[in-house]
Image (spheres, grey):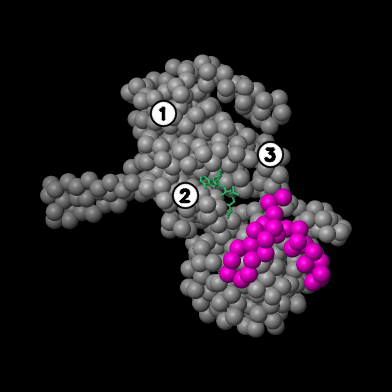
Amino acid sequence: MAIDEQQISSIVSQVLGRLQQEGVIGSQVAAPSAPQPIARIQPPAVSVGGSDGIFPDLDSAVAAARVGQKQLVEATLDTRKQMIAAMRQIILDNLENLARLAVDETGLGRYEDKLNKNRLVATKTPGVEDLQPIAWTGDDGMTLVERAPWGVIGAIAPTTNPSETIICNSIGMIAAGNSVVFCPHPSAKRVTNLAVSLFNRAIQSAGGPKNLVCSLAEPSIEYAQALMKHPGIRLLVVTGGPGVVKAAMNSGKKAICAGPGNPPAVVDETADLAAAARHIYAGATLDNNIVCIAEKEIIAVAAIADRLKEELKRCGAYELNASQTERLMKVILLKQNGPGEESEINKKWVGKDAHVILREIGVEAPSTCRMVLCEVNRNHPLVWTEQLMPVIPLVRVRDIDEAIELARDCEHGYGHTATIHSKHVDHMHRMARVMDTCIFVKNGPTFAGLGLGGEGPTSFTIAHPTGEGLTTAQHFTRLRRCVLKDSFRIV
Ligand code: NAD
């Protein structure tokens, strides 16, 4: 369906008007202005876009993103840098709105943690500086390899990091000269589209084009599937669970896929147990454990398991006894599978506070309690399941060999994230090699691997199935080689 600018403007005005009425858009965000005519490099193939990047259908969004992208590559790199600076700033100005809306709309996670996650991606996602050329010179002249954009990228976002994914993907994709059409998770469309509209405002305020970041007003799985097949999309970037990753990898398009994890935390007899407990408690409770990199099970060698549990309880964890654990499993798991397989979780409890989950089995814990701890055997369903809630199983094992073997198995070979707490260099080295994960953290919370309290840039699209790891601008490019024969040497 082709729509005109007036219709799009009216839809965007309604969406933003509602968001403003509900207090979810900050005062920094002005009411939408009437769309200005786009200075088109060439006429768009299908349709035109609105000024806030939110469209009622996929064809209009892709067509508008295509126009925006053509304008982007005509603009100077300096303008691109200014656009990215403005994108970072508008997110920092709207952290509270994004965090509040994410919790209210999705019902997942914690407001305070979402502030930190959004701040992290706004400040530590690399920009244009991530794109470095490679040059060779010699008797035969000079060869230069540069990173060129793909054009319009199709990106699918999860409900667990609804604005964080938009922020890091958009900054990286635009830094690399692309535009992007997002398909949000249907249960996170308001917060996702808030981030999209904020970015459109920031980009235009910095002199950039409209519609570099586009999204759908009413996303659905069908739209996500249509995005994967759309002829105007050259690259897919998908962040979510196993279903969407499989669909993208079967789409026939180049796909960068970030899928599920089940990160183990191994603790050996040489670890500083107070520090290990502090780090695991902080990591496994981040945003109530909905983050894919968050510690999902603890594997402790027998010699220190009791002391580690005491330290975890000192941090605030509530330990269940065996019968309480059994009761809780009936609440949070819909179907319990054996070792080696994921069990089916009850989504009602995903991302909920620990004390709320405990209340369901009749345990009253203070609201400061952020972790439910349960000691289980290695075959317990929770050890093998990405539970996405702050209920953390602990398995006691004989020694480091058994710990590493179990960590490898229960991570399912995803190659996502793992962590060890140890002072034994050989143990750390051996586990890192065996796990072969995109992120491996020694003696810290797994979120240090995202650059949160750890060194290095960040991303919330950790592409383990397709091998890019933490995706940044350079991954959203095509390598292009330009050769100058014979005549160019300066030495
Ligand atoms: P989800 O798979 O339910 O949804 C993710 C997105 O994919 C949504 O936009 C959804 O509409 C779409 N989708 C789902 N199934 C699809 C299909 N068959 N075809 C097309 N589109 C489809 O995941 P979620 O609950 O939103 O997010 C949690 C999951 O995502 C967890 O497994 C988590 O580990 C993973 N995740 C991974 C990363 C990473 O960087 N590796 C980051 C965030 C989340």
Depth order, front residue of 408/241: 241
Q: Which mark is residue 250?
A: none
Q: Which residue is mark 2?
A: 247
- Of the image marks 1 and 2, the number of the one nearer the N terminus: 1
- Mark 3 falls on what kind of element? helix
Circle 3: is it few (<14), some (14-19), or many (20+) Cα within 10 Å? Answer: some
Determine contact: label 1, label 3, CB under 8 Å: no
Identity of the residue drawn at 62% across and 60% down: 386
User: Amino acid type of disc 1?
Assistant: Ala
Q: Where residue 314 appears, x then y in whole percent?
A: 79, 67
Q: State the extent of the magenta-drawn residues as a range.
A: 320-348
From the image, tell me which residue sits under label 1. Answer: 63
Q: Which is nearer the eye, 418 or 269? A: 418
Q: Which amino acid, by three-letter code, is at mark 2? A: Ala
Q: Is mark 2 within 8 Å of ligand 1?
A: yes
Q: Amino acid at mark 3?
A: Glu
Q: Who's the residue at 43% across and 52% down the image?
A: 249
Q: Please state the horizontal and vertical placement of residue 33, each as a whole percent of the image.
A: 56, 18
